[in-house]
Amino acid sequence: MASESNLRGRLAGKSAVITGAASGIGRATAERFAAEGASLVVNDREAAALDSLVAALTGKGAKAHAVSGDVSREADVRRLMDTAVQAHGGIDILVANAGVIPEADLAAATAELWDRAMATNARGMFLCCKFAAEVMVRRGKGAIVCLSSISAFAGQPGQAVYGPSKFVASGLTKHLAIDLAAKGVRINAVAPGTIATPAVARMAKEGIDKVVKLHPLGRMGRPEEVASAILFLASDEASFITGAVLPVDGGYLAQ
Ligand SMILES: NC(=O)c1ccc[n+]([C@@H]2O[C@H](COP(=O)([O-])OP(=O)(O)OC[C@H]3O[C@@H](n4cnc5c(N)ncnc54)[C@H](O)[C@@H]3O)[C@@H](O)[C@H]2O)c1
């Protein structure tokens, strides 16, 4: 990640904002983007973990700033985007990754759990897209990648709240693609299968083992494999792709 290689990276000269970057897929994406030459502003509500990520990135020569905050709070999201503009002159890329993965079937799900999950996965993703797009539209260019899921395509046990929340990610991607196309801004999503992140490690092992068997490639994905797909959609190599939801799922949705 030396500055010389940054000049040659696939995101050289780009300013990127990544939410939920302290863990899992967000962290792997931040590391990959930095290695590809992007200047980063990273967010998470876990401030200490976020600071340690930024220390690791800057230690390797990357430009990175931490803005801790909750994506469901409008003021926090505005502060995040304002920081990117002040630090790097604009926003070329948003990765709307911050998310929670509650496990609950319909009987166990409560209105309170629904509101809490939707605050991050739906309202938070909407706010991030809205305020990043404002900056991008002013400059007539930009690319957004949202984190959807296989749970936005196929029913699964214990996802009475999480599954619907991920339909929001796919829905924002489709509808905002139409709003933003003429303004030079692309928006796409990735739909990961089961990925080996701290969020998945916290789930009941028996249920995860069953789901992993449903992935034709026969294993969980790695956060770095999702980061590669996000990198492609965020980069200029995807310049004619907008409104797409790309499965990164070991073949789960092919069945
Ligand atoms: N891991 C999987 O199998 C999988 C599969 C499909 C989709 N996804 C999606 O990928 C994204 C990342 O998941 P992960 O598995 O890496 O989870 P993770 O728990 O490892 O990381 C998520 C990060 O988001 C942060 N976060 C949560 N709510 C926040 C909020 N309101 N404001 C700011 N930060 C917040 C957390 O602190 C955490 O650091 C999520 O949107 C998730 O729905 C994950």
Image (tube, grey):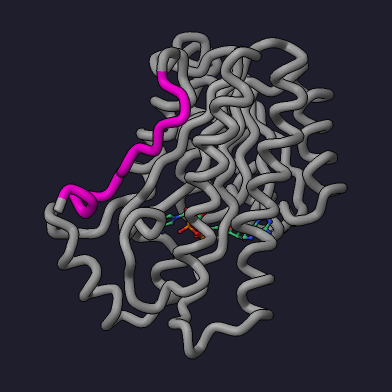
Which residue is painted at 31% across and 80% down in the image? 205
Q: Residue at the right extreme?
A: 75
- Taking the magenta stretch, the answer to whether it contains residue 248 is yes
Q: Quadrant of residue 229?
A: top left
Please state which of residues 85 and 255 is positioned toward the viewer in this rendering. 255
Visible in this render: residue 202?
Answer: yes
Visible in this render: residue 30?
Answer: no
Which residue is painted at 23% across and 51% down in the image? 253
Give the answer, above or below, for where 237 lies relative to 154.
above
| Magenta-colored span | 241-254
Which residue is painted at 38% across and 47% down in the image? 191
**Residue 44: x, y in percent?**
67, 53
Q: Quadrant of residue 186?
A: top right
**Residue 13: x, y in percent?**
59, 13
**Residue 9: x, y in percent?**
45, 16
Give the answer, above or below, for where 153 lies relative to 110.
above
